[in-house]
Each structure stands twice: as C-alpha cells, then as structure tokens.
Image (cartoon, grey):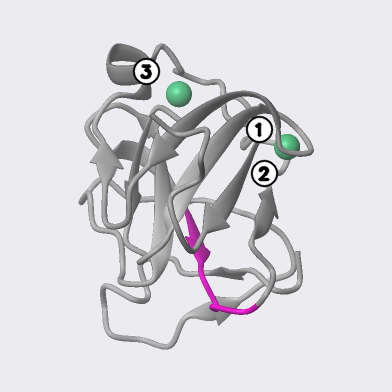
Amino acid sequence: MSRLRLVIAAAVLGLAPLAVASPAYAADTDGVCPMDNICFWESVDYTEDRYTWYDNNSSQQNYEIGGWNGDNEFSSLKNATNKWAVLYANDGYSGGTVCIKPYGSSYSLGAQYGFNDQAESFRLYASKPSFCP
Ligand SMILES: [Ca+2]
Ligand SMILES: [Ca+2]
C-alpha cells in the first residue's frame, strides 16, 4: 500500500496531498474526484464517505481495497484517470467485474451494474481489457 497516496479534502483546498501507508476514507459529500485519482463513495450519487486512490502512473496497477470500511462498501465511483478501471468482487482481482472507462463514472454501482457494496479489489489498465463489454 505504500505506493498509494490518499488525497483527502486537502486537494480540494489546494493543499498538498497526504501520503499514507494504508487506505483510509474521509467524509466528503461534494462529489469531487481530483485529477489522476479514482474515487469511491459509500453511497450512491457520490455521497457519504469518499475513498480516494492516486494513480502514480508507475508499473503498479493493482489495488487491494482494505478490509476495514473498504471491502464491500463502495456504491458509486468516479475514475479521474486516463486508464480503464476494473472492479473485482473478490480480493486478489478475481470474481465478478465491472469496467469503468477512462474518465468514466457510475452514480450507482447497484442500479447500473448490480454491484452495490461488492468491490474488494481493483486494477487499472492502460487500454481496454478484452473481457470488458
Ligand atoms: Ca455502500
Ligand atoms: Ca480487499
């Protein structure tokens, strides 16, 4: 998790992002997702707690969502990266998937994909994966 940077509301305020060693969350109901980040919200329509990961454009493209207040929590998301984001229902990038295009979003993973509170890991891809619809 050391390659992940959490950006809390600091980015919105123009402050430097915080570097942390593990996923965390911040109460944030403004629906904003900073550029080059992928953001998840606890509830639909980008509301309640926001979980944010920064894409550092390194070779690391796999993100294991933390178990506490992370796994099986996400209900909406915004992908503010230039990569495809694939959500996986299980840890270790396995199980059912949802594909979100570059700069795409989902106001309701449940309504749009039947995937509410399902994501346990995700992976970013530079080009569209062959298994994505
Ligand atoms: Ca939820
Ligand atoms: Ca996980």
Looking at the image, residue 99 sits to the left or right of residue 119; the answer is: left
| 11, above or below 104, in the image | below
| 25, above or below 111, in the image | below
Image quarter for ligand 2 equals top right
Residue placed furthest toward the front: 130
Quadrant of the image occupied by residue 95: top right
Mark closer to the chain start, 3 or 1:
3
Instruction: For ligand 2, tell me if the residue under mark 1 lies within 8 Å.
Output: yes
Residue at the disc numbered 1: 120
Query: Which residue is at 26% across, 78% downward?
Result: 13
Q: Which of 14 and 112 is in front in this view?
A: 112
Residue 76, x across and y down, in percent: 34, 33
The reply to whether discs 2 and 3 touch (Cβ–Cβ < 8 Å) is no
Q: Which amino acid does label 2 sit on?
A: Ile
Question: Circle 3 sits in a helix, a strand or a loop, which is it?
Answer: helix
Q: Which of 65 and 14 is in front in this view?
A: 65
Residue stretch rendered in magenta on the structure = 52-58
Residue at the disc numbered 3: 113
Instruction: For ligand 2, tell me if the residue under mark 2 lies within 8 Å.
Output: yes
Query: Which residue is at 75% across, 64% downward?
Result: 1
Question: Circle 1 sits in a helix, a strand or a loop, which is it?
Answer: loop
Residue 133, x across and y down, in percent: 38, 29
Question: Circle 2 sits in a helix, a strand or a loop, which is it?
Answer: loop
Residue 21, x across and y down, in percent: 74, 68
Q: How crowded is mark 3: few (under 14 residues within 10 Å), some or many (20 or more)?
A: few
Quadrant of the image occupied by residue 82: bottom left
Q: Residues within 10 Å of mark 1 (few under 14, many from 20)?
A: many
Q: How crowded is mark 2: few (under 14 residues within 10 Å), some or many (20 or more)?
A: many
Residue at the disc numbered 2: 65
Q: Distance between the residues labelled 3 and 1?
A: 15 Å
Is 68 contained in the magenta span?
no
Query: Which residue is at 24% across, 31% downward?
Result: 107
